Image (spheres, helix red, strand yellow):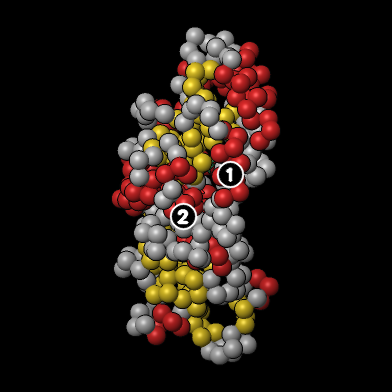
């Protein structure tokens, strides 16, 4: 028998989250962002739930090929654009739209031989300082693209650094409005945090929004808001079973480095999930976990293949945990109790995004 660990991808939740994003986005079209193999969920597994999206946005050309292979004929956007000249051939062949964020990409387009002009999204660096033309250079980049026979429509995009936090989007939005003023073309600026928090403004919504993490049921601005308060449903459950129960006496320690020492007699469970499954090693004593659907905590250090959990709250709740009892690391337990991935991420000093994307290859994945 394989190890009892398993991830479940919840198709109905993916579809409901897309509808949720759509309600916030009103009349704007919605890109389903499926980069990083659909945030660790698997492009082929989310495809059915997202086929009502208006387009798919991703980074990797092989992932674009996979979306086309599934039969998607609508728009696909490469969020970082092309990486080398011959990528443009694939863009022509698969009719991919692509971001243009630097002069080198314009040079490649200018040298590209094609019968079919390509649609591009010109990217402004409005303050994130990762990709895009700085405001003083934006309009000349646009003029250069506009003069190319290889280019069809030019749209405008930028990316917010603080849509989830107190600094907000005003400073970047201002820069975007100034740089793009009077230029023709569609606009796209909102990621999930901006969709949820700022897309009430039709101008900010623009023509296309780029929904990523919200589709996967995680709150981009946790803990200010939880997924539940945004009405987002968990799309991934990571669950396993207990392999053993240990009785500790006061003074007994648990696991590598003896990081946890029992203050009184207590029972702990050993669950078949560790950092080689993608569970964060930095999750410390106190990180929430469900055993038999009852909320309890991790104790001691996460090891490669196992974690140890406090069973006292589980016994207190009237559940008798033992070999084979269900353990939910995040997501939905068999009894329906939810452990938000964002709470686990916070306890491990990271974000839901990272946990989803880090789900290890060795974990079997089922879809429901
Ligand atoms: C990843 C990404 C998104 C989606 O971000 P979320 O926070 O997951 O919604 C949007 N736009 C760009 C350019 C991205 O790279």
Describe residue 313's horizontal placement relative to residue 358 as left or right: left
In the image shown, does 252 or 47 lie closer to the viewer?
47
Question: Which residue is the site of mark 2?
Answer: 197
Q: Name the side, left or right, on which 154 lies relative to 251.
A: left
Above or below, 154 relative to 296: above
Residue 331 picture location, percent across and down: 41, 61
Is residue 357 among what the camera can see?
Answer: yes
Distance Cα–Cα, label 1 vs label 2: 17 Å
Residue 304, image x, y percentages = 59, 60
How packed mark 1 is, by other alpha carbons closer than 10 Å (few <14, some 14-19, many 20 or more), is: few
Residue 91 drawn above or below residue 316: above
- Residue 167 in percent (x, y) is at 60, 57
Residue 168 lies in quadrant:
bottom right
Could you tell me which residue is drawn at 59 percent across and 85 percent down?
262
| Element class at badge 1 | helix
**Residue at position x 50%, y 15% from top?**
117
Q: Earlier in the sequence, mark 1 or mark 2?
A: 1
Q: Residue 98: x and y, percent?
A: 53, 27
Q: Quadrant of residue 6?
A: bottom left
Q: Which residue is mark 1?
A: 174
Q: Is residue 270 left or right of residue 136?
A: left
Q: In the image, what residue occupies the spot 42% across and 74% down?
A: 295
User: Which residue: 39% across, 85% down?
Assistant: 316
- Would you call the spot at circle 2 few (<14 residues within 10 Å), some (14-19), or many (20 or more)? some
Which mark, by number, is residue 261? none
């Amino acid at each position: 028998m394989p190890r009892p660990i398993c991830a479940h991808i919840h198709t109905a939740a993916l579809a409901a989250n897309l509808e949720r994003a759509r309600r916030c986005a009103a009349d704007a079209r919605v890109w389903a962002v499926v980069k990083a193999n659909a945030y660790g969920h698997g492009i082929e597994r989310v495809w059915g739930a997202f086929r009502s999206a208006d387009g798919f946005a991703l980074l990797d050309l092989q992932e674009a090929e996979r979306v086309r292979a599934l039969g998607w004929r609508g728009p696909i956007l490469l969020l970082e654009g092309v990486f080398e000249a011959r990528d443009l051939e694939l863009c022509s062949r698969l009719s991919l739209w692509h971001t243009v964020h630097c002069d080198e990409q314009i040079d490649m387009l200018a040298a590209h031989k094609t019968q079919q002009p390509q649609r591009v999204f010109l990217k402004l660096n409005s303050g994130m300082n990762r990709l895009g033309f700085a405001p003083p250079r934006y309009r000349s980049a646009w003029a250069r693209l506009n003069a190319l026979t290889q280019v069809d429509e030019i749209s405008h995009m930028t990316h917010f650094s603080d849509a989830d936090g107190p600094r907000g989007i005003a400073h970047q939005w201002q820069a975007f409005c100034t740089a793009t003023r009077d230029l023709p073309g569609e606009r796209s600026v909102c990621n999930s945090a901006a969709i949820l928090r700022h897309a009430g403004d039709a101008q900010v919504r623009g023509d296309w929004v780029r929904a990523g993490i919200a589709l996967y049921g995680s709150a981009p601005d946790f803990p200010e808001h939880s997924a539940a308060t945004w009405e987002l449903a968990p799309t991934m459950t990571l669950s396993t079973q207990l392999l053993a129960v240990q009785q500790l006496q006061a003074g007994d320690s648990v696991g590598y480095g003896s990081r946890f020492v029992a203050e009184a007699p207590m029972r702990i469970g050993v669950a078949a999930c560790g950092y080689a499954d993608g569970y964060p090693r930095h999750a410390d004593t106190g990180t929430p976990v469900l055993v038999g659907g009852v909320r309890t905590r991790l104790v001691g250090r996460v090891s490669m293949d196992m974690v140890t959990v406090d069973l006292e709250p589980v016994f207190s709740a009237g559940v008798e945990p033992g070999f084979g009892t269900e353990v939910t690391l995040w997501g939905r337990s068999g009894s329906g109790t939810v452990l938000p991935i964002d709470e686990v991420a916070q306890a491990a000093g990271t974000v839901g995004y990272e946990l989803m994307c880090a789900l290890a290859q060795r974990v079997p994945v089922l879809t429901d």
